[in-house]
Amino acid sequence: MSQATAAPPRFDASFRARFAELVRWRRDVRRFRREPVAPELIEQLLALASHAPSVGFCQPWRFVLVESAARRAAIIENFKAANQAALAGYDGERRALYAGLKLEGLTQAPVHLVVCADEGAATGHRLGRATMPETLRYSVVAAIQTFWLAARAEGLGVGWVSILDPAAVGRELDLPPDWTLIAYLCVGWPEEEHDDPELERHGWEARLDHTVTEPLKR
């Protein structure tokens, strides 16, 4: 049996309080300033994201920076079509409310980051995936959350654009066939700061009462 060689870190009450604040301030940002983000900072954040947990230590996350103006334009058109289709699914006041929401920062964000799951990843030797293969994609979501919190700690904002046709995104970005789109992220310096979710602020949904999130006991 291997011996522990490093002392575990100690996180004091001040750190824990700041971490709780960080979690609460991790908002989905849709409004960005246009000033660039240093590539070195993005690399640093991706390195931290790559320390996220993964099933069987398969590390299936794959990152793609979308820098081509033509490809970004294709993604914007993809969003517009998907957004119109989504709007058609609502009626009355809910339709009007949806139409007034800002749901992406594609035209403002200086960084477009795609995060995919490599479904053919040989790393991890399929450990833990036989009974729950979806855990491979869950591992990528864990990396996204790690990236998001690390970005917020640097003052950066992140927005997750899910109103997209994922198959079309794969074609538009020429992604490998074994890669599944998990997230299209807009990253940049926020134009404004809020500690409440935008959808709550604009009346789309209210935060659930804490009693709803209490665990069941069996």
Image (cartoon, rainbow, N blue to C red):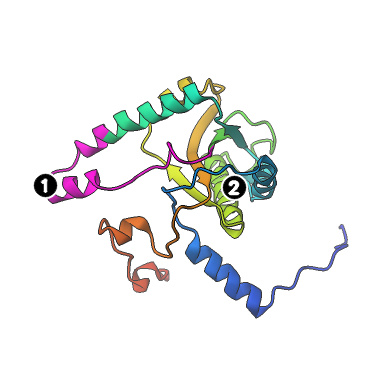
Contact, CB < 8 Å: mark 2 with mark 1? no
Q: Tag on residue 143? A: 2
Answer with left or right where residue 160 lies relative to residue 17: left
Gap between marks 2 and 1, in whole Å? 38 Å
The extreme left residue here reads 92
- Residue 183 on the magenta span: no
Q: Nearer the viewer, residue 162 or 39?
A: 39
Q: Whole-percent x and y of residue 155?
A: 57, 57
Name the element at disc 2: helix
Q: Which of 33 and 28 is in front in this view?
A: 33
Residue lying at 66% horizontally and 40% vertically, measured from the top left: 39
Residue lying at 33% horizontally and 46% vertically, measured from the top left: 102
Q: Is residue 148 above or below residue 179?
A: below
Q: Give the range drawn in magenta.
A: 84-111
Q: Tag on residue 92? A: 1
Residue 111: quadrant of the picture? top right
Residue lying at 30% horizontally and 28% vertically, measured from the top left: 81
Q: Which quadrant would the N terminus be assigned to in this image?
A: bottom right
Q: Tag on residue 65? A: none
- Residue 132 seen: no
Residue lying at 38% horizontally and 33% vertically, measured from the top left: 164
Q: Whole-percent x and y of residue 55?
A: 62, 45
Name the element at disc 1: helix
Answer with left or right where residue 129 lies relative to residue 2: left
Q: Which of marks 2 and 1 is nearer the N terminus?
A: 1
Q: Nearer the viewer, residue 212 or 125?
A: 212
Q: In this view, does 144 lie above or below 213?
A: above
Q: Whole-percent x and y of residue 73?
A: 43, 26
- Residue 96 on the magenta span: yes
Q: Which quadrant would the C terminus be assigned to in this image?
A: bottom left
Amino acid at the residue labelled 1:
Gly
Image depth: mark 2 or mark 1 in front: 1
